[in-house]
Image (cartoon, rainbow, N blue to C red):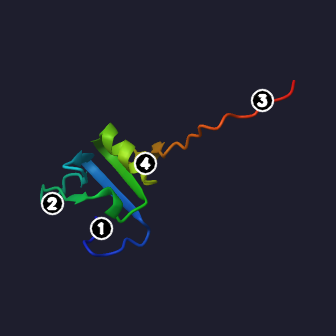
Amino acid sequence: MTLLGKHNHYNVKLLRGYGVSIRLKDNRVCLENGLDILTGKRETEEWLVTEIPCEIVVISGNGYITTDAIRLLTSKNINVLLTDTYGNLISSMNYTMTSNTAHPERPD
């Protein structure tokens, strides 16, 4: 996981293992890594969405992400990728840009 006060070179946060989660907690994004096989503990980080030091969050393995977290992360242009345990892409969540401008009608 990213070290506090350090800039992540690739701007990618990888969360992997069993029990990975991304959720909102007290208006902060809570990133929880899977269980460490040696210590049995989890690394947890909490960030204001404007302070997250990454542009992409990858969840690999068994875990979950809440819809509120998806909405907040993608609205701030932070992409969320879901992969299986082998790194194969399952889903990519990006912000959907919408426009209130109507498209001109096409001539027939």
Mark in the foreground, 3 or 4: 3
Q: Left or right of 65: which side holds 94?
A: right
Mark in the foreground, 3 or 1: 3
Mark in the foreground, 1 or 4: 4
Q: Nearer the viewer, residue 108 or 10?
A: 108
Residue 1 placement: quadrant: bottom left
Q: Which residue is under mark 2?
A: 38
Mark 4: which amino acid? Thr
Q: Which residue is under mark 3?
A: 105
Q: Which residue is under mark 1?
A: 2
Q: Nearer the viewer, residue 97 or 90?
A: 97
Mark 2: which amino acid? Leu
Earlier-in-chain disc, 2 versus 1: 1
* Residue 40, image x, y percentages: 12, 55
Question: For numbered disc 1, what is the local secondary structure?
Answer: loop
At 35% from the left edge and 49% from the top edge, which residue is drawn?
60
Disc 1 to disc 4, how far (Cα)? 20 Å
Residue 84 placement: quadrant: top left
